[in-house]
Amino acid sequence: MTQKPYILILYYSRKGATAQLGQYIARGVECVGGIEARLRTVPAVSPTCEAIAPPVPEEGAPYASLDDLQHCSGLALGSPTRFGNMAAPLKYFLDSSSSLWLSGALVDKPACVFSSTGSMHGGQETTLLSMMLPLLHHGMMILGIPYTEQALNTTQSGGTPYGATHVAGLDNQQPLTEDEIVLARRLGQRLAEAALKQSRI
């Protein structure tokens, strides 16, 4: 039996803002027929070498495997900002993907990135760019958000041409704005449409 094509929405989220953004990207994916969204997360990285994360998270999306990554038709990669970079747990997972790089498993698959920050100028764009680098090494095709999306011109908070973003506030107290939601959904829709087009080539 052939597996239905899916977009892997892979993220790390400590306080929930990045996970919520990923859920709106998933809604955008699922408004496109013929493809589904698969939400996955990565475990936290512990400063204690002996600490082991449980095999299944207590709540939220299941942990990602390299198989999830290898067999996806497209990838949405998300992380909160850590000093202008992706968070260590997501980078740790990506650093384990060299076998996929060696085999070319992700070459020509479409990808996009998304992020959340505590403040308006907290490093959203540099974080998005930091997530693009390993995807480019894998030979993936990066999608952004074009300015034909009206919400990109009107947003007063998150949303960039590099990817979907959310300004969560220092204590994660800011809900997603309507513009942030629209941009996340449209990014998911664009990614799903691109993946289906690519699979027909």
Image (cartoon, rainbow, N blue to C red):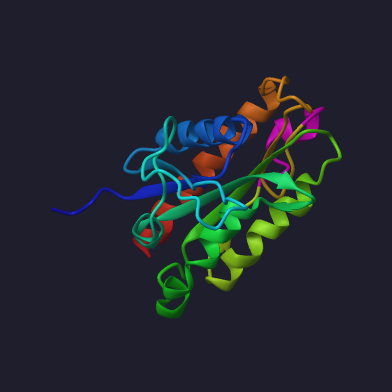
Q: Given the current orientation, which residue lies at the most extreme bottom position? A: 102
Q: Can you name the residue that lies furthest to the left here?
A: 1
Residue drawn at (78%, 29%) of the image: 155
Which quadrant of the view contains residue 180?
top right
Residue at the image point whose x is 71% and y is 50% from the top = 162
Residue 122 shown left or right of residue 8 in the figure = right
Residue 10 position within the rendered picture, expressed as x and y whole percent measured from the top left:
49, 47
Magenta highlight range: 145-157
The answer to whether 153 is drawn above or below residue 78 in the figure is above
Q: Which of these two is toward me, 20 or 43? A: 43
Q: Is residue 166 left or right of residue 142?
A: right
Numbered-mark total: 0
Q: Is residue 43 left or right of residue 162?
A: left
Residue 151 lies in magenta, yes or no?
A: yes
As rendered, which of 54 and 77 lies closer to the eye?
54
The quarter in which the C terminus is drawn is: bottom left
Closer-to-camera residue (169/71) = 169
Say if the magenta span includes residue 154: yes
Q: Main secondary structure of the magenta part?
A: loop
> Residue 125: image x %, image y %?
77, 49
| Rendering coords of residue 116 (x, y %) | 69, 38
Q: Quadrant of residue 70?
A: bottom left
Find residue 71 and report its horizontal and vertical position in percent. 34, 59
- Residue at left offset 48%, top offset 73%: 98
